């Protein structure tokens, strides 16, 4: 009897804890998505990249502060338009030496190994969208290092809801792709450093006022 009396507070506490548990602002509920024009949330939009280093391991970095727009109508997903600008000059890695090399000028006035000290922004502009439920293949033109090539993003809807701080309607997506950097004029140390670059993209769009 004493054990039962001790357990009673816990039995009452469980539903109270469940009721007070905070709910995530964003969920994978497509019914929350409304038509309109959305702008990127640059502080929470990241473009990760990964390459193989000498076949031993991978190293990776991030582009942040991406800006752009998404024009979206849930009833006409294949008519969606995406336009994103990526400031290459803000590339970040965990190694100061590597980051410095990516932005280093070419030796004796020659061609830079990677982006150089004053790289122009990269840009992705969609040309077609083929949606299938909560996933889509987004084809577009990627301009990087002054070269434009077609790229396909395998994209997945990851959540929608209202940002709890600014109350803006927000939608999020995750996308992946693989590009060959030599096609964009960045062929330094291929194949010792892989030509294939895996892109891992996490983007949040906030509905324009």
Image (spheres, rainbow, N blue to C red):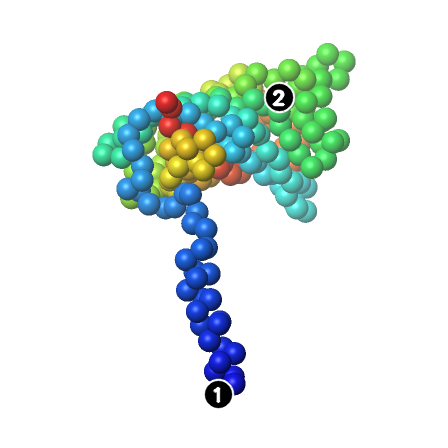
Image location of residue 78, percent across then percent down: 27, 32
Q: Is residue 195 visible?
A: yes
Q: Total label count?
A: 2
Q: Residues within 10 Å of mark 2 (few under 14, many from 20)?
A: some
Picture quadrant of residue 74: top left
Question: Which residue is depicted at the point 37% across and 33% down?
Answer: 169
Q: Are marks 1 and 2 in contact (CB under 8 Å)?
A: no
Residue 186's x, y, as percent? Answer: 60, 25
Q: Residue at x 55, y 36 (%)?
A: 48
- Of residues 194 and 164, the one nearer the viewer is 164
Residue at which label 2 appears: 89
Nearer the camera: disc 1 or disc 2:
1
Please name the residue that numbered disc 1 is placed on: 1
Q: Left or right: 133 with respect to 165?
A: left
Q: Earlier in the sequence, mark 1 or mark 2?
A: 1
Residue at x 23% of width, y 34% of height = 75
Q: Residue furthest top?
A: 109
């Amino acid at each position: 009897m004493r054990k039962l009396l001790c357990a009673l507070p816990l039995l009452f506490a469980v539903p109270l804890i469940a009721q007070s548990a905070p709910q995530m602002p964003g969920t994978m509920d497509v019914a929350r998505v409304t038509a309109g024009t959305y702008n990127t949330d640059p502080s929470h939009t990241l473009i990760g990249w990964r390459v193989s280093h000498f076949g031993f391991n991978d190293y990776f970095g991030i582009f942040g502060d991406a800006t752009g727009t998404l024009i979206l109508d849930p009833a006409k997903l294949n008519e969606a338009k995406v336009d994103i600008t990526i400031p290459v000059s803000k590339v970040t890695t965990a190694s100061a030496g590597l980051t410095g090399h990516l932005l280093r000028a070419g030796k004796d006035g020659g061609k830079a190994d990677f982006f150089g000290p004053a790289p122009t922004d990269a840009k992705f502009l969609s040309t077609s969208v083929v949606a299938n439920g909560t996933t889509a293949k987004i084809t577009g033109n990627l301009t990087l290092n002054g070269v434009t090539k077609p790229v396909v993003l395998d994209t997945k809807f990851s959540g929608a809801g209202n940002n709890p701080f600014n109350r803006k309607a927000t939608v999020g997506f995750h996308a992946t792709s693989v590009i060959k950097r030599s096609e964009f004029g960045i062929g330094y140390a291929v194949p010792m450093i892989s030509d294939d670059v895996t892109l891992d993209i996490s983007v949040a769009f906030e509905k324009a006022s």
